[in-house]
């Protein structure tokens, strides 16, 4: 059953915040700032709820006899130790930074490192499986940019450096600008649907 | 290096090897490392959120500030409390109230951000391509700049045409307008492919730098350990 109260709240606060962006009345601007401040607190609370939910889900998995329960135990160990240390001493304390520097950064950087291998593999697969105009343009652009990223064993291909600069300044900018405008138009359309009550992604069907 | 640094370097080295083990195939050690990474990341995110948002913006005003600010902070405190009911499926419906508030504010903020942060600046940047007076008018390169500006304009419009916002027509035959838009969209696909190729190269360069960094770290660690024993 649809609850009109929820819809009224969403539309009401949404319109006040939106008007606060475009009309420079003190009341509207102050209301926008206060509503955004409260929303920030709620987003932070939602993140904490997500972490609590993550803990509950993996606690259940680790206490039942499941084949991958060791994964859940590793997750719970990481979560509780980090929350215990960083929560007790503070996130900028030496102990917290030790976890950050010697556990988080090595894993993040290593994952980023294996991404390079995965990207090469994906590029080769793209050309082998679907060699059409777009995939050739995609790979050719990437190769041209990469060739001129570093020194090419002393080899100087005439015009390649200029071509790389031109690609970066003209066609890539055109595509990026089109994508950005398309994304922002999509965001505006989706936001307006919520503010008009056509979409109600907050429960109550 | 002190003992804590040695232990940290050893832990980092082992974790690097465990993550790199993915290169020979998906395996349980890699998955355990990944789960631990998720746990540590989530823990850090939660602690940073508590220290930087929940404590200073919710609890400090309640206990330290004046009466008016205390009353003002009661609203988000109640909404946050109601949001916690989302954890329980039985009481999750109570959490719809703060969710509706959050969705309304987020939608408005997203619209405001998209208009003032992307739509207007990008449209202005497209227009400025043809402002020859601002580009030291009529020098030797002005013609080239105009040609580049026209290419960027065509590319931007063609890329936009590729994203179809309208409802697709149910009619079997395409109208002339639809045929035009489809043709323009195909040109736009080429520009999108170039943009993604450019981004791909950038991400690949960054990933390669990270790979080199981890390999160098591992080599340095091994040589340091060997140096300890050989000395």
Image: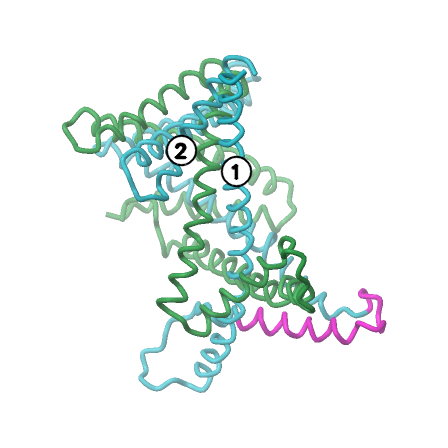
Around disc 1, counting alpha carbons within 10 Å, would you say few (fewer than 14), some (14 to 19), or many (20 or more)?
A: some
Question: What residue sits 38% from the left and 42% below the top?
Answer: B100
Q: Nearer the viewer, mark 1 or mark 2?
A: 2
Give the x, y percent position of residue B85: 30, 30
Determine if the magenta segment contains residue B148.
yes
Assign a secondary structure to mark 2: helix
Above or below residue A172? Residue A100 is above
Q: Is residue A64 left or right of residue B198?
A: left
Determine if the magenta segment contains residue A187.
no
Q: Which residue is mark 1?
A: A36
Assign a secondary structure to mark 1: helix
Above or below residue B59? Residue A131 is below
Residue stretch in magenta = B133-158
Give the x, y percent position of residue B174: 38, 84
Of A4 and B112, the residue lying toward us: B112
Of B214 and A205, the residue lying toward us: B214
Badge 1: chain ID? A
Chain letter, colour cyan? B
Above or below residue A198? Residue B74 is above
Q: CA distance from mark 1 to mark 2?
A: 44 Å
Q: Is residue B8 left or right of residue B27?
A: right
Q: Which mark is residue B17?
A: 2
Of B30 and B195, the residue lying toward us: B30
Give the x, y percent position of residue A53: 30, 31
Question: What residue sits 63% from the left and 71% below the top?
Answer: B153
Q: Which mark is residue A97?
A: none
* Residue B72 visible to the viewer: no
Chain letter, colour green? A
- Asked which quadrant contains residue A153, the reply is bottom right
Badge 2: chain ID? B
Of A144 and B98, the residue lying toward us: A144
């Amino acid at each position: 059953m649809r609850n009109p109260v929820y819809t009224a709240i969403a539309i009401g606060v949404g319109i006040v915040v939106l008007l606060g962006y475009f009309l420079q009345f003190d009341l509207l601007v102050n209301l926008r700032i206060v509503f955004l401040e409260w929303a920030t607190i709620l987003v932070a609370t939602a993140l904490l709820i997500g972490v609590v939910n993550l803990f509950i889900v993996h606690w259940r998995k680790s206490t039942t006899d499941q084949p991958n329960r060791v994964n859940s135990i590793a997750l719970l160990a990481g979560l509780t130790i980090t929350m215990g240390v960083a929560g007790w001493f503070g996130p900028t304390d030496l102990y917290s930074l030790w976890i950050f520097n010697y556990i988080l950064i090595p894993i993040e950087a290593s994952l980023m490192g294996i991404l390079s291998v995965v990207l090469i593999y994906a590029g080769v697969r793209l050309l082998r499986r679907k060699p059409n105009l777009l995939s050739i343009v995609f790979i050719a652009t990437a190769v041209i940019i990469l060739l001129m990223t570093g020194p090419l064993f002393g080899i100087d291909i005439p015009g390649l450096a200029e071509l790389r600069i031109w690609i970066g300044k003209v066609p890539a900018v055109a595509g990026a600008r089109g994508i950005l405008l398309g994304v922002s138009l999509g965001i505006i359309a989706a936001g307006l649907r919520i503010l008009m009550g056509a979409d109600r992604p907050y429960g109550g069907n | 290096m002190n003992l804590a640094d040695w232990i940290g370097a050893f832990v980092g080295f082992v974790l690097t090897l465990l993550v790199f083990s993915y290169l020979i195939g998906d395996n349980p050690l890699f998955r355990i490392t990944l789960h631990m990474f998720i746990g540590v990341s989530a823990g850090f995110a939660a602690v940073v959120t508590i220290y930087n948002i929940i404590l200073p913006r919710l609890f400090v005003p309640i206990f330290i500030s004046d009466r008016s600010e205390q009353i003002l902070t009661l609203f988000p405190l109640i909404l946050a409390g109601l949001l916690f009911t989302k954890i329980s499926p039985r009481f999750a419906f109570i959490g719809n109230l703060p969710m509706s508030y959050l969705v309304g504010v987020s939608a408005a903020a997203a619209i405001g951000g998209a208009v003032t942060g992307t739509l207007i600046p990008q449209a202005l940047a497209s227009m400025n391509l043809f402002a020859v007076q601002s580009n030291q008018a009529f020098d030797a390169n002005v013609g080239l700049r105009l040609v580049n500006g026209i290419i960027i304009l065509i590319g931007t419009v063609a890329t936009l045409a590729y994203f179809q916002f309208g409802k697709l027509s149910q009619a079997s035959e395409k109208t002339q307008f639809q045929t035009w838009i489809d043709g323009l969209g195909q040109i736009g696909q080429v520009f999108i492919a170039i943009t993604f190729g450019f981004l791909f190269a950038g991400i690949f360069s960054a990933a390669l730098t990270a790979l080199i960094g981890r390999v160098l770290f591992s080599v340095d660690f091994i040589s340091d350990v060997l140096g300890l024993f050989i000395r």
